[in-house]
Image: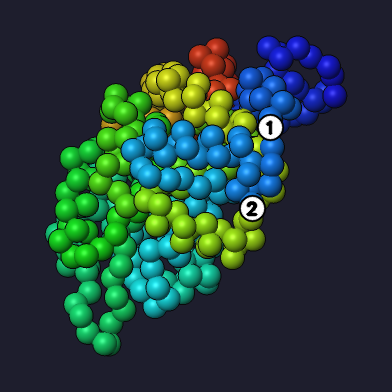
Amino acid sequence: MVQTTSTEIIRPHGDFAMDAIDLRSDTVSWPTPAMREAMANAAVGDDVYGDDPTVNRLQDEAAALFGKEAALLVASGTQGNLVSIMAHCRRGDEIIVGKQAHIFRSEAGSSAVVAGVQLNTLEVRADGTLDLDEIRAAIRIDDAHQPRTSLIALENTQAIRGGVPLTTEYIAQVADIARENNLKLHIDGARIFNAAAALNIPVKELAAGADSLTFCLSKGLSAPMGSIVVGSKEFIYHAHRARKLLGGGLRQAGIIAAAGLVALRDMPQRLHEDHANARALAQGLANVPYIHVDMDRVHTNFVYFELDEHAPLTPQALRDRLKDDYNILMKPYGGGSLFRAMTHYWITRDHIDQVVAAMHTLLS
């Protein structure tokens, strides 16, 4: 590893991925120099004993930022969602969740496999919301033949629908339905800071109606790993037990938490730059032959576009040429002709211009 000052980006020699323009996801972002320095100098303890001072500071700051009583550091957003489900639900219960939600599509069936909870899925509309009447209709009656509905889960931003943010007004309406029916509301807020930036409001307002919320320190905030779950002290007590059951008891986790503190304090304020870059990318791609972009679907840092069936390259060939000829990483989403490109801290406006130019060259 090359020795650098704390203000330089550390890039291993010959590492293709770190030199590439990587648009596959915002999960590919790597820690900033400030995060690396904080990790190297972090005060640590044994978090299982609750005496890691950096973890405790991160959890306290996260809870305060979201207006909740307590918080818990977990390994990932998937683990955060799962410990939340386990804290809220009994085995045999049912959750109302979107058919396009990460909890349903991308968490390996963990709700059923681990928690013994089944999912009642509703269609997610173009604006990222679940229909309120459909939510009401999905709540089970008190009947021994049926599972008990115990939880409603929302996703903000809603990834499959283009990273669209859910508004405080909508969340409040869902929260009212939950309260009226003695249910809990969980928000998968993996990119909740992107939602707050798009709506120009504090994250506390987006969390106000939720009994629990999980958000990622990685992705747009660029920490190397980790997510945070927030909620009441009682909820976090049960979530903490669930984390231990899942093998998530952490030891000297202050090294992780130190990067998380930098992410929490410094990164949300700049997310509008990622959103602007995403819109610039979408606008540039809209002028490339054989590319179809729905600009109404560009809300935050997601760009979805379709490659026309008459294009001179197949989706797979386009992916390969971008990688081999231009060091640009992007791939078809779901194996078809739909592509998803995502902006993040390490994607600059110059990178956007390079991507659009490369696409023009390959498809003209």
Question: Looking at the image, can residue 152 be seen?
Answer: yes
**Can you say whether 25 is above or below 283 in the image?**
below
- At horizontal 58% and vertical 22% (from top left) the residue drawn is 346
- Where is residue 196? Give x, y as percent: 34, 30
Q: Which residue is mark 2?
A: 48
Q: Which residue is mark 1?
A: 43
Question: Looking at the image, can residue 20 be seen?
Answer: no
Question: Which one is nearer the viewer's eye here, 262 or 101?
Answer: 262
Report the disc number at residue 73: none
Q: For residue 25, which quarter of the picture? A: top right
Residue type, numbered disc 1: Ala
Residue type, numbered disc 2: Val
- Where is residue 225? Give x, y as percent: 61, 40
Question: Which one is nearer the viewer's eye here, 108 or 89?
Answer: 89
Which element is circle 2 on?
Answer: helix
- At horizontal 17% and vertical 49% (from top left) the residue drawn is 173
- Where is residue 137? Give x, y as percent: 17, 67
Q: Residues within 10 Å of mark 2 (few under 14, many from 20)?
A: some
**Can you say whether 321 is above or below 349 in the image?**
below
- Where is residue 306? Give x, y as percent: 43, 38
Which element is circle 1 on?
Answer: loop
**Can you say whether 272 is above or below 61 in the image?**
above
Q: Are marks 1 and 2 in contact (CB under 8 Å)?
A: no
